[in-house]
Amino acid sequence: MARYSYDRRYRRKSGFPWGLIFFFLMTSGFLEVAFDFAGSLIELITMAGLILVFFGIPIAAFVGFIVLIGKLIGKIGQKKVSRSATSVSTKELLSIFQSYFEYNDKLYIDNDTYIVKTSSAGAALEDYDLFMNDEYVSDLKLFANSFPSGFNSFANVVKDLTSSKKKKKKQKEVVEEPVKKEEKKEEPTVQTDCAFYIARLSSLSNSITNQQIREGLAESIKYLNQIKKIEDEFSECKNKTTKLYQYYLPMLSDILQNYVRLSTNTFESEDLKASEDRLLKTIVLINGALKTISSSLTEDYYTDLKVDMKTLESVLKKDGLVDEMNQNGSQEG
């Protein structure tokens, strides 16, 4: 009995009064307040999550924009910009852009940063976009409105870059211009006149073994020599030989060249024999044409000669200086 009483006293003195606390909480309404607080806390966390869902992307984009602009301004600050007394105006900057983007697609500020023209007009800052590390940052109007000081430094960098590129381009043109002039060398032109084709037909004839064809070409060369002699003496008649050097003789030269290639690199055959027969007829035709041309070259000169002689005779007769009997006698003789 004494032991039991000791145990109960010990437990009261040394044990934590959980039962009493639980009773107090249940009777005081604390748990109700705690549950209400927990519910409010859950609602608060839920609302915060919804806010992040709806506004997280714009906020992240804005933060990214600020970071990229900060990097750009930092890079611009590292560049040595020759600051003028007055800042570059928007009008001057747009004029620089329009001139530059007429022949270029991108304007690089550095290795990672560049500007791209997005509108064909290019008359406003919003027509140009800024990229960094191949990522879109903003258009230049937003950049100028958001960071006026940084944009001012940026405009000075653009002005210095474009002016230095123009100077380099001019220097390159000055250096390369004499080189280009030296490289332009006129190739000597071959005058395809009568002498040219006389030499050409003679060379081809030496490569041909068919005797009839060689004889036909010899006759062609004879007529060409006659034509050359007439042209050398009467240069006015060359207007009648234009087609001869532009069509007839070039075609004949090509035909003979192809025949030489076939006859020297193939065995005798019916096709080769037929080609030789046809070539002989062609040479006969060209020789007839050469003979006609040769005669026609001096035809006008003979006509003029006859007219001049008749005119002289008429004048002498009119002046009574010609004896009719002598004239008739000379005509009869």
Image (cartoon, rainbow, N blue to C red):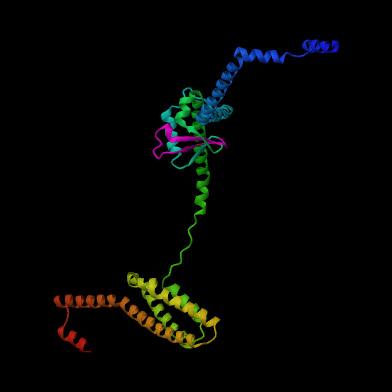
Q: Residue at x 42, y 73 (%)?
A: 250
Can residue 159 be seen here? The reply is: yes
Q: Is residue 202 visible?
A: no
Looking at the rendered image, the quarter that the N terminus falls into is top right
Q: Going 49% across and 87% down the picture, which residue do you hit?
A: 210
Residue, far bottom? 333
Q: Closer to the camera, 265 or 271?
A: 271
Residue at 52 percent across and 85 percent down: it is 209
**Above or below for 122 versus 3:** below
Location of residue 10 (image quadrant): top right
The structure residue drawn at horizontal position 80% and vertical position 10%, both measured from the top left corner, is 9
Q: List x then y, in percent, for residue 192.
A: 43, 70
Is the residue 64 above or below the residue 215 in the image?
above
Name the quarter where the C terminus is drawn.
Answer: bottom left
First to last magenta residue range: 110-132
Instruction: From this view, report whether residue 268 is shown above or below residue 80.
Output: below
Task: Relative to 234, say whether 286 is above or below.
Answer: below
- Place of residue 158 in the rendered image (x, y in percent of width and height, measured from the top left): 50, 32
- Side (left or right) of 158 relative to 243: right
Q: Quadrant of residue 317?
A: bottom left
Q: Nearer the viewer, residue 217 or 50?
A: 50
The count of marks equals 0
**Viewer-proximal residue, 244 or 273?**
273
Q: Position of residue 24 (x, y in %)?
A: 65, 12
Is 222 magenta? The answer is no
Report x, y in % for residue 95: 42, 33
